[in-house]
Image (spheres, rainbow, N blue to C red):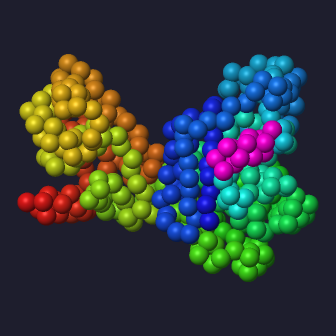
Amino acid sequence: MKIHIIKSPELSPELFTKTVELLSAVQGAISFSFNKDSVLNFDEDEILEHTFDDVEAFEKSLYHVPCYSPSENDITFPHTHPQATWTTLFAKCASYRQQQRIPDDEFVILLTDMANDKNWFASLDEHMPYNGFIHTDGWSHYIDCPAQFPIAYEVIALLLQKYMFSGMYDLRTSVHKTPVGCVNDMCIKKREIILKLRTADICRSCMDRIKDVVPAPVIHHALQIMESLRVKMLYAQNFRQDSPLSTLMITQHHKLLLPEFGHIEIKLRPLEKALYYLFLDHPEGIFLSSLSDYRQDLYSIYSRLSNMGMLQEMKGRIDDMTNALNNSASEKISRIKRVFEEALGHELAKNYYICGQVGEVKKIGLPREKMIDQRKAVVEKSK
């Protein structure tokens, strides 16, 4: 079973990529196709403008429950809010399907920040239920975690709902209007979505709807992805901060994985990863003012991580990072910290990123017995 994920221009490439990475992290019967450079634009005549006279009308119409005040979000009234009709959103999917010659039994899901006229999180096209959209904006009003988690969840929810319901009427009359922690909770009050995200479950009655319609491997893979999202979301929300430390595994292909934390992968850019590896290789710590002493080590590490650019360009990046008068190393250490905190929450992350006060030695506090470094096996094998 294949899902093609596409985007509109206002959705950031970073959020788009993170969403697909979450979905692709668990291998199984569902495959995902994406291209962040394939962008579907909205024409001017496809965008509607809805004007709200005051904050009460805005909150009631857009979010169903009060979520924030206009002063907190620099909204002034009357406020005009752009949105698109479902017809327009589904037409974008249909157009992409035709252009790319995608088979009728493969999904095309549009991720867009553009609001929709019915104010739904997501929906499938009743007339072509392999087409659908997910509204990617505003999740911070309902759930305290990065937006890629609920967006990825909705992708799986749409797939399952395609096979659970025979049409829009069936969906409207069969979903759970009172939340029970099932993928098919209606969430009339949008904040209620937190329950089904934290349970990552399909209730018995909904399971009965699909068990004879969807191949077991697809159901199993969908549940695995939902559970993976649930676990990773709990860490990102600063839950489970008292968990025992996970092993940090560096694979032969230079992936940074945390197996005991639901196989969370820490995504760093090559230059950031080279710096991180250097600190892992020196548990005693390194003064940033002394980074130039490790320039050759960084050349060697970075050359194995990146095939981008010429040798001289690569050396130039390392030279900039090891220059004591340049802020490059500090900026990369700050981003490494942010990536770990987004994945693990503030407390757990402290054990994994590079720490140290200004002017003092910086180091990674993770006990080295909590590391599995498969790079060494590759080096030994190549000798």
Q: Is residue 26 above or below residue 16?
A: below
Quarter of the picture containing the C terminus is bottom left
Q: Which residues are magenta?
A: 88-101
The residue located at (78%, 23%) in the rendering is: 44
Which secondary structure class fits the magenta region best?
A: helix
Horizontal and vertical percent for residue 4? 62, 52
Q: Is residue 361 above or below residue 123?
A: above
Which one is in front, 2 or 58? 2
Give residue 66's quadrant in the image. top right
Q: Is residue 109 visible?
A: no
Which one is in front, 103 or 199? 103
Horizontal and vertical percent for residue 140? 64, 41
Horizontal and vertical percent for residue 310? 23, 31
The residue located at (63%, 31%) in the rendering is: 10
The residue located at (16%, 38%) in the rendering is: 298
Magenta stretch encompasses residue 269: no
